[in-house]
Amino acid sequence: MNVYSRGTWAVLGAALLWGTTGTAATFAPRGSSSLAIGAAAMGIGGIAMFLGARRAAAHLITSGGAGRTLWLSAGFVVAYPLAFYTSMSDAGVAIGVTLSIGAAPIAAALIERFRHGRPLSRGWAATVAIAIIGATLLGTGRVDLVHHGALQELTGMILALVAACCYAGYSVAASEIIADGASSRATVGALFGLASVVLIPVLLITGPALLSNPRGIVVAGYLGLIPMTLGYVLFGHGLRTTPASDATMLSLLEPAVAAVLAALIAHQHLSEPGWLGIGLVLASVLLQARSSRPRARRPPVPAEPALAPRASS
């Protein structure tokens, strides 16, 4: 298996772990704020990722080598969970997830196109189209029965698009920092460590119901340490050799995994169009995995040790 294929598998592994977050969140105590759950996942994960690469991450932050890109990317990491979870609350889970995850590859590709001149091939466009159709079917197959006001739904849709842009912006910025010579662990540790400085206070303000219950603490710990810490370490490793637009495309596996787990474990009904959507998303991911190519017009990245199961290694 060559280096690039390992990067592809690392991104798919991250998407697989991220797909468990929705089902895990259903075990949170009643009354837990979705905003608190998002802040817990990213905040706790950010602390763990920083501690796992503290020397290299601290050096990256204090040396100023990454410049404004580091701080901009950390801002994206802060804004993403706040916009994402609020969008699901305002517009419903189906619309929030579909827009946030489905629009990210397009946003990342456009950013790379204007910043690095990376061409948008017809094959990539066709693959994204298949994925978006699948994500839309998946979303409508799980649509909530709660009716929101028009203004609230519009606000949720806008926030979902903001979340998509934040995810794409983080991916492209982190990819640039890694391509400039920083290790993936140092980059992820620095970005999420900086973000946790903001997200942990948000958790403390919005999370009394979550943090006052032992089950809530277990849920928050799982979300922060497994899907977030290990997932983003894998994602950062994948960005060493995978363009951000391809990585965000591959991460569309996440909603498919989430839907399957919700149906099997949380006993949430998934309609026939939803299952068809899962099939289309999986097909698009397989097509992208086969057609992906190494990052063009970027300097080579120094080799680093293979990932261990823990972020602290």
Image (tube, rainbow, N blue to C red):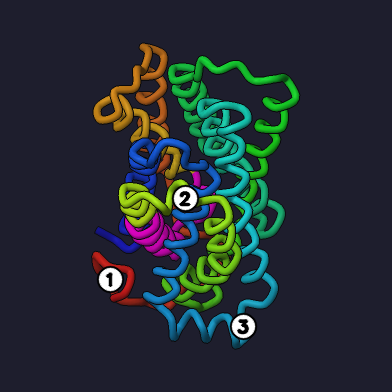
**Near-viewer residue (259 or 298):** 259
- For label 3, the SS is loop
- Where residue 280 appears, x then y in whole percent? 40, 25
Q: Which is more toward the observer, 236 or 291?
A: 236
Give, as a single range, the part of the protein colored magenta. 224-248
The residue that mark 2 highlights is 247
Please state if 91 lies on the left or on the right of 287 as rendered: right
Q: Quadrant of the N terminus?
A: bottom left
Q: What element carries label 1?
A: loop
Q: What label does residue 65 carry, if any?
A: 3
Where 268 sits versus 294, above or below? above
Residue 223 in percent (x, y) is at 37, 52
Asked if disc 3 and disc 1 are in contact, CB closer than 8 Å, the reply is: no
Mark 1 Cα-neighbour bin, 10 Å: few <14, some 14–19, many ≥20: few
> What type is the residue that disc 2 sits on?
Ala
| Element under disc 2 | helix
Q: Which residue is pictured at 70% across the width and 73% down the height?
A: 68
Question: What residue lies at 56% left-to-right and 60% top-to-bottom?
Answer: 199
